Image (spheres, coloured by chain):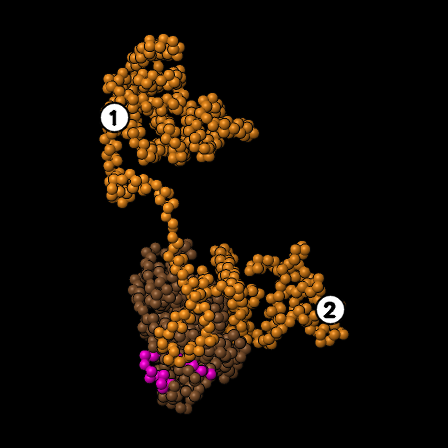
Chain colours: A brown, B orange
């Protein structure tokens, strides 16, 4: 580790002393690199306790270090950073209360609590999911099943996907996608094994039927897993969702769908006021037993469009290339146009007002050419490219590829694959995400 | 010279050198003769001497230096060239190790080195002499330092054909010396040595008058006489019989080019001081530029200047401890840190103390606390939004210090129960193996064989639903988590395929008696060679089971046993008494 540090311009390390209950927040811009070492004390990042005297490196993500006890951290960054110290003890107490209450539910039943987290954007939903998973691991050897239904966020996968992942060991605080999915080699922390379904579009409102159908697909896999795996079943579900205003809040179609599909029995609303919780409780009282509202933490990083894009870029990069700690080698493979078959989900915005007559869950075949595919991320399904299209709806995703180069005149393209192999003879689904290397 | 002769000589040289545990002239002389006779072994001799300088006890280092000095002065090149290389290092090292008396002697020896040779050159390399000189200056040998430049100056101006030293001047010096000696003889007429000395001086006088001598020889005689004068002067004042003897000894060798630097020079130093202390009308004062009183003055003022500037610098850097009260006790306490530290107890670090207290408090707080029985823990708005509830303050310890053993690599915590201890051991073991694996990958990337790690395909829905995370977090390494890849070949039944994967993962560590590293499966009669497993650090036979005294391919055994079970009469392997039971764990 020291030898690696020698290569870098030595920048004077700064120390920050944190009192018990204080939070140290900083956003590391993409391209910058922050190294933090805990000198003494107990600190955690979203519920994951950091090891002392081990340098942690953060790139392009927000870092929130919470001091459980009086602690001293040492940090350095070549860019100028302005970390903010804040104190929000009661928020953390709420989260503790919540996690102990959930813990008791796990002890009372073989079916762990199935928790749905809802709220507006930037109200701490993902952070809460993160913390609850981490705390669950600390008490016993639970494997809470983390479900991410926000297609703009990549959790153990790329943005565009929705995933379900049993959290069987500590999360990787340095990773932008919460940790690594299984690799061919060795990773510093335990790998996680997600189930990945592809939505592919950025906005849920562009194709609600497809979103619902993708959720159903994910839920059926999850239900099957819960049936097979008593540890996961007892550990329960923690479901993170996109901004609730992306959902239809008149009919509550998405929320209702999620509650039914995952058999939700507890809802946590992240909000300043009770309004949303009251509405939800009015609508779903009969199905869901517990409603709890938690005010958002004061130190939340408001993610705007630019930051979201930057984060997505980092997540895509990490999927293919790994982190500084775990360097992954993707493979670029060439193929003829006729060797690949690509579909794309329908997008309501392309159809104007005629949505009533069309089936939005149907996929359209995409003509292979540069304007359609250049720099785009494609989801590689597990169904053969010769299979019928209707199978696409139930397809699982075995991985993502990046089309780096399309040559219309030679009718050849090059695909960056995470796995060293030929381009799989599988149907692919075009996502709305682009990545320019 | 044959190599055998060479090694004999070297051996003898080494033995003789090792015998130099006291200042023995005969040994030094014989070693010098060795060096002169076997020039071809110069480098080896130099190495032997240098290694002895390095290794021998400090009290004997000086004698080894004398050997070196003697060889260089008598045999000259190439010894001087070889020695120049490490001279300053060895000198410096030795100087720092020896006592003050020996240091004085070393300085005296050094002074003889800066006397120019007849050729006008110095004996050793300029740069190494310079570095020794600057070292000596730094080593706070202040009076030596200030005395050195004039000597050099004088010697430089006294170089070849110097007009200052003529036969005439030497003769007058000898006359004066003879006068002193004779006056001594008057007081102690019985002293035969003094008589001999007078005779020798006479002889020397005759020699000088008789022959035309080379200027360098004159210089030599002049130097010798200077020393004798110094001694004589001292002896004159102190009347010490012993020193007188030594002086005579030196005088006897006066004509020889071989100049022992040992005692003569040491006394020379004293002599200079004595001389300068004595009356300014010193007998020698006139004929030499060596003006002692002036030098003395210069030295003293130099010393004062140096000291005051040193103190100033120290004060500037806050390295100087100035006790507020001019108390000797305060100074003594400062100067004796050992004394100080023996009385104060070094407290452990803050974090360690905090850890001990925190862990104890956590244990105390969580005693008899049970989440299961705490009915207050309700998933309700009322409880969750209560930030004052005392139970939370206690329960929080469950997440941290109740498990006091924190993994130093990832921060995961473990408790003190036997079960938790076991988990911790497994966890650390996992880290260790992963680190070995990661290191293996890294070291391989620098080598030509590149081990590349990349992401695996995700599992599809069915595979994932059947997947158990134990395969990832399992601490026994046989699990094939990393190998489990969704295959594109769907023809095989999934569960069957999984079973075969497991069968293939069965392995046996190659037993010691398997000298040819292979086993032959009795079913398929194919031989399998052992392969090295990096994780286990053992040679293994993969896809192998050990039944009775035979080794089988796990897959062959499974198939044969299955068919035997299905059709017990027609199996051709009936004699093998196959038992499917050994795969029970896999089949579940």
Lower sequence index among marks 1 and 2? 1
Give A218 or B262, whichever is nearer the viewer: B262
Examine the structure image and report whether residue A278 is included in the region drawn in magenta: yes
Report the span colored magenta. A263-280
Residue located at (37% from left, 12% from top): B194
Task: Place residue B406 in its image quadrant.
Answer: bottom left
The subunit letter for the residue under badge 2 reads: B
**Residue at horizontal 52 percent and vertical 71 percent from the top:** B469
Q: Secondary structure at mark 1?
A: helix
Mark 1 touches mark 2? (CB < 8 Å): no
Q: Looking at the image, can residue B50 be seen?
A: no
* Coordinates of residue A29 in the picture (x, y in percent): 33, 66
Give the number of the disc on residue B577.
2
Q: Is residue A173 above or below residue A393?
A: above
The CA distance from mark 1 to mark 2 is 109 Å
Q: Would residue B10 appear left or right of B291 to someone viewing this image?
A: right
Name the residue tied to disc 1. B295
Please provide percent x and percent y for residue B282. Answer: 26, 17
Chain of the residue under label 1: B
SS at badge 2: loop
Q: Residues within 10 Å of mark 2 (few under 14, many from 20)?
A: few
Q: Please determine whether, in this image, residue B306 is positioned above or below residue B266.
A: below
């Amino acid at each position: 580790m020291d030898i690696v540090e020698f290569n870098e311009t030595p920048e004077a390390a700064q120390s920050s002393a944190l009192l018990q209950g204080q939070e140290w927040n900083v956003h590391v811009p993409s391209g910058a690199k922050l190294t933090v070492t805990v000198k003494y004390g107990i600190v955690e990042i979203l519920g994951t306790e950091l090891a002392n005297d081990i340098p942690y490196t953060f790139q392009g993500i927000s870092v929130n270090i919470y001091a459980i006890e009086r602690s001293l951290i040492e940090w350095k960054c070549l860019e100028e950073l302005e970390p903010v110290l804040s104190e929000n003890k009661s928020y953390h107490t709420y989260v503790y209360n919540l996690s102990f209450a959930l813990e008791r539910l796990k002890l009372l039943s073989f079916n762990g609590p199935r928790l749905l987290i809802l709220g507006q954007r930037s109200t701490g939903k993902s952070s809460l999911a993160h913390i609850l998973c981490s705390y669950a691991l600390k008490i016993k050897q639970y494997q809470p099943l983390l479900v991410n239904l926000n297609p703009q966020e990549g959790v153990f996968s790329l943005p565009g996907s929705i995933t379900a992942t049993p959290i069987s060991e500590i999360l990787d605080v340095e990773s932008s996608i919460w940790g690594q999915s299984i690799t061919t080699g060795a990773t510093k922390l335990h790998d996680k094994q997600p189930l990945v379904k592809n939505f592919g579009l950025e906005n849920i409102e562009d194709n609600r039927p497809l979103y619902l159908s993708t959720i159903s697909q994910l839920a059926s896999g999850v239900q099957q897993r819960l049936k097979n795996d008593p540890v996961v079943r007892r550990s329960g579900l923690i479901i993170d969702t996109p901004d609730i205003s992306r959902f239809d809040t008149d009919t509550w179609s998405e929320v209702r769908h999620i509650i039914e599909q995952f058999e939700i029995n507890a809802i946590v609303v992240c909000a300043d006021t009770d309004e949303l919780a009251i509405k939800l409780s009015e609508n779903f009282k009969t199905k869901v037993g517990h409603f709890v509202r938690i005010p958002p933490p004061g130190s939340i990083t408001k993610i705007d469009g630019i930051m979201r894009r930057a984060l997505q870029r980092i997540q895509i990069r990490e999927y293919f290339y790994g982190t500084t700690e775990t360097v992954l080698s993707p493979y670029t493979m060439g193929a003829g146009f006729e060797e690949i078959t690509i579909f794309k989900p329908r997008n309501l915005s392309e159809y104007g007002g005629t949505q009533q007559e069309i089936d939005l869950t149907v996929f359209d075949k995409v003509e292979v050419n540069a304007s359609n595919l250049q720099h785009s991320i494609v989801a590689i399904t597990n169904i053969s490219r010769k299979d019928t299209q209707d199978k696409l709806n139930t397809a699982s995703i075995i991985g993502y590829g990046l089309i780096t180069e399309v040559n219309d005149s030679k009718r050849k393209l090059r695909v960056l694959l995470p796995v060293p192999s030929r381009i799989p003879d599988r149907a692919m689904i075009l996502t709305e995400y682009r990545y320019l290397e | 010279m044959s190599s055998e002769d060479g090694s004999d000589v070297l051996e003898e040289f080494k033995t003789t050198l090792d015998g130099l545990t006291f200042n023995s002239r005969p040994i030094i002389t014989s070693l010098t003769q060795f060096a002169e006779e076997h020039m071809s072994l110069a480098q080896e001799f130099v190495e032997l001497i240098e290694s002895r300088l390095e290794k021998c006890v400090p009290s004997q280092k000086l004698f080894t230096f004398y050997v070196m000095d003697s060889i260089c002065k008598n045999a000259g090149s190439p010894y001087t060239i070889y020695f120049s290389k490490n001279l300053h290092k060895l000198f410096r090292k030795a100087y720092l190790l020896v006592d003050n008396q020996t240091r004085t002697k070393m300085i005296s020896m050094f002074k003889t080195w800066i006397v120019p040779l007849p050729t006008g050159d110095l004996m050793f390399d300029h740069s190494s002499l310079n570095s020794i000189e600057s070292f000596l200056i730094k080593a706070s040998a202040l009076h030596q330092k200030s005395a050195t430049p004039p000597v050099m100056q004088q010697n430089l101006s006294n170089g070849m054909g110097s007009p200052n030293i003529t036969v005439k001047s030497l003769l007058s010096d000898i006359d004066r010396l003879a006068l002193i000696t004779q006056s001594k003889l008057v007081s102690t007429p019985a002293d035969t040595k003094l008589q001999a000395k007078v005779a020798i001086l006479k002889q020397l006088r005759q020699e000088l008058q008789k022959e035309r001598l080379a200027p360098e020889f004159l210089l030599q005689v002049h130097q010798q006489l200077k020393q004798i004068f110094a001694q004589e002067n001292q002896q004159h004042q102190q009347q010490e019989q012993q020193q007188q003897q030594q002086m005579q000894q030196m005088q006897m060798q006066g004509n020889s080019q071989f100049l022992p630097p040992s005692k003569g020079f040491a006394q020379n130093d004293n002599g200079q001081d004595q001389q300068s202390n004595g009356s300014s009308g010193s007998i020698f004062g006139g004929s030499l530029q060596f003006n002692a009183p002036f030098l003395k003055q210069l030295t003293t003022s130099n010393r004062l200047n140096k000291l005051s500037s040193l103190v100033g610098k120290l004060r500037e850097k806050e390295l100087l401890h100035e006790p507020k009260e001019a108390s000797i006790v305060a100074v003594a306490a400062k100067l004796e840190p050992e004394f100080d530290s023996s009385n104060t107890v070094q407290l452990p670090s803050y974090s360690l103390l905090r850890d001990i207290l925190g862990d104890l408090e956590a244990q105390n707080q969580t005693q008899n606390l049970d989440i299961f029985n705490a009915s207050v823990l309700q998933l309700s708005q009322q409880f969750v939004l209560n930030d004052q509830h005392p139970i939370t303050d206690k329960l929080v310890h469950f997440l941290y210090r109740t498990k006091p053993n924190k993994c130093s690599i990832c921060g995961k915590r473990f408790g003190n129960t036997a079960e938790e201890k076991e988990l911790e051991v497994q966890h650390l073991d996992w880290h260790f193996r992963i680190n070995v694996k990661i290191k293996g990958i890294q070291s391989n990337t620098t080598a030509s064989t590149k081990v590349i790690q990349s992401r695996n395909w995700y599992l599809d829905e069915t595979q994932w639903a059947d997947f158990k995370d134990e395969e990832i977090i399992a601490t026994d390494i046989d699990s094939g988590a990393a190998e489990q890849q969704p295959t594109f070949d769907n023809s095989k039944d999934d569960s069957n395929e999984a079973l075969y994967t497991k069968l293939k993962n069965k392995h046996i560590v190659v037993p010691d008696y398997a000298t040819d590293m292979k086993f032959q499966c009795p079913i398929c009669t194919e031989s399998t060679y052992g392969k090295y497993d990096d994780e286990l650090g053992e040679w293994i036979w993969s896809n192998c089971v050990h039944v009775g005294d035979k080794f089988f391919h796990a897959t062959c055994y499974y198939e044969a046993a299955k068919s035997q079970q299905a059709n017990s009469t027609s199996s051709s392997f009936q004699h093998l008494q196959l038992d499917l039971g050994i795969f029970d764990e896999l089949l579940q």
